[in-house]
Image (spheres, rainbow, N blue to C red):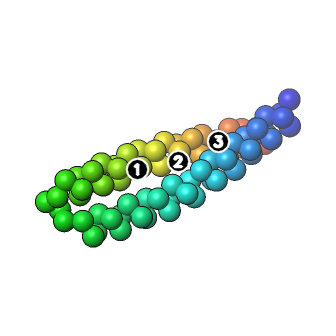
Amino acid sequence: MDGELSQYVKSMRLMLHDLAQPLSVLAGQVDLLMIEADPSSRQFDEVRHLSDQLQVIMDKMEALRQLARQINSLVEN
């Protein structure tokens, strides 16, 4: 069972990593849009909202990655 659990945790960590990569690219593109947008425009507010929501997703994914690391550590010991 421990071998299976370890494999599941490893798979989860890889999937989270694979999801984080395109989100990081997207966050970079959104940051560029914010730099180019006029701060007084509606577009700026919408892009800022998108940026905030991306950050929420990335923070939650990081929490899941930390949890997976902790579980992996417990399984290996």
| Residue in the image at 19% along x and 65% along y | 38
State whether residue 58 is above or below residue 44: above
Q: CA distance from mark 1 to mark 3?
A: 20 Å
Q: Amino acid at mark 2?
A: Glu
What amino acid does circle 1 point to? Answer: Gln
Residue 26: % across, % down: 47, 59
At label 1, counting other C-alpha atoms closer than 10 Å, the crowd grade (few under 14, some 14-19, many 20 or more) is some
Q: Is residue 77 left or right of residue 50?
A: right
Query: What residue do we see at 64% from left, 41% from top?
Result: 68
Q: Which mark is residue 55?
A: 1
Q: Secondary structure at mark 2?
A: helix
Label 3: which residue?
A: 68
Residue placed most toward the observer, 75 or 31: 31
Asked whether the viewer can see residue 62, the reply is yes
Residue 55 location, x and y as percent?
40, 50
Find disc 2 in the rendering and name its residue: 62
Which residue is nearer to you in this view: 11 or 67? 11
Crowdedness of circle 2 by 10 Å Cα count: few (<14), some, many (20+)? some
Of marks 1 and 3, the one in the foreground? 1
Task: Confirm whether residue 77 shows in the render.
Answer: no
Q: Give the quarter of the figure containing the N terminus.
A: top right
